[in-house]
């Protein structure tokens, strides 16, 4: 049977909010160039839409993590695809993520990126499930704060499905 997906945030709401985020970033980073670090695969739709509205010189790099929740379930995050240190050192870096949930993934990514000595580091996430934190973590730019429902679309998947939905929805 096909899954039922209830729309939570429409495509129009998403693109309008991303324009607002871009405006804020344009003002905060005026006269600077930025490196966007895009977390594969979920943040791709968000990153492309955001980048179109940024007015400073923008460079785009990609990272991918896998989290090992093995028998010990320690939630260790391993970088499957990383960015060379020399690309990051001395640069203004913004990490783009699809959703902050427990906070574990971005805590690891942030620590790994800080070791590469950027001039500055900010976190920008399309979604924030703030009430689901297991470790304390705050993003710098947040599109929408949502509840603890599992959401799909606009890059976010459920078992690799539904990334291509143009809106964000809840799988019922
Ligand atoms: P966390 O903050 O370490 O718990 O993990 C964040 C990651 O979990 C995100 O990058 C997503 O890949 C995944 N994730 C968390 N919540 C959702 C959801 O509702 N839909 C799809 N992926 C999710
Ligand atoms: Mg992700």
Image (spheres, rainbow, N blue to C red):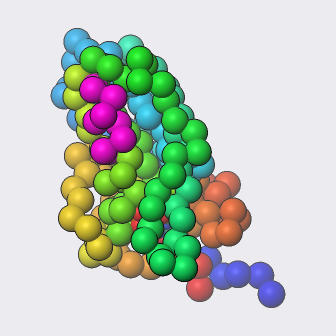
Total label count?
0
Vertical placement of 117 versus 63: above or below?
above
Residue 27: x percent and y percent? 20, 26
| Res 130 quadrant in image | bottom left
Q: Residue at x 69, y 62 (%)?
A: 160
Query: Is 159 one of the magenta-colored residues?
Result: no
Could you tell whether 142 is left or right of 62 in the image? left
Query: What range of the chain is rendered magenta?
Result: 110-118
Q: Residue at x 59, y 79 (%)?
A: 171
Q: Nearer the viewer, residue 108 or 153?
A: 108
Could you tell whether 74 is left or right of 115 in the image? right
Vertical placement of 120 versus 16: above or below?
above
Residue 29: x percent and y percent? 23, 23
In the rendered image, is residue 99 in sight? Answer: no
Tell which residue pokes out farthest to the front in this image.
72
Q: Nearer the viewer, residue 92 or 165?
A: 92
Q: Residue at x 38, y 14 (%)?
A: 57
Query: Is 113 one of the magenta-colored residues?
Result: yes
Q: Quadrant of the N terminus?
A: bottom right
| Res 148 quadrant in image | bottom left
Residue 9: x percent and y percent? 46, 64
Q: Quadrant of the C terminus?
A: bottom right
In the rendered image, is residue 60 in sight? Answer: yes
Q: Residue at x 58, y 45 (%)?
A: 80
Residue 8: x percent and y percent? 47, 70
Could you tell whether 148 is left or right of 67 in the image? left
Q: Nearer the viewer, residue 97 or 23?
A: 97
Could you tell whether 80 is left or right of 24 in the image? right
């Amino acid at each position: 049977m096909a899954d039922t997906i209830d729309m939570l945030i429409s495509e129009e709401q998403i693109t309008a909010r991303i324009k607002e985020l871009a405006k804020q970033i344009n003002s905060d980073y005026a006269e600077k160039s930025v490196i966007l670090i895009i977390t594969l695969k979920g943040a791709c739709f968000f990153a492309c839409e955001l980048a179109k509205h940024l007015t400073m010189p923008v460079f785009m790099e990609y990272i991918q993590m896998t989290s090992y929740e093995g028998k010990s379930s320690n939630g260790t995050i391993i970088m499957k695809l990383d960015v060379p240190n020399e690309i990051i050192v001395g640069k203004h870096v913004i990490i783009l993520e699809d959703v902050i949930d427990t906070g574990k993934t971005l805590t690891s990514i942030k620590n790994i990126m800080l070791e590469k000595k950027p001039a500055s580091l900010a976190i920008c996430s399309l979604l924030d499930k703030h009430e689901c934190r297991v470790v304390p973590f705050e993003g710098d730019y947040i599109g929408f704060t949502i509840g603890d429902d599992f959401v799909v679309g606009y890059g976010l998947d459920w078992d690799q499905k539904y990334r291509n939905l143009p809106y964000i929805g809840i799988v019922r």
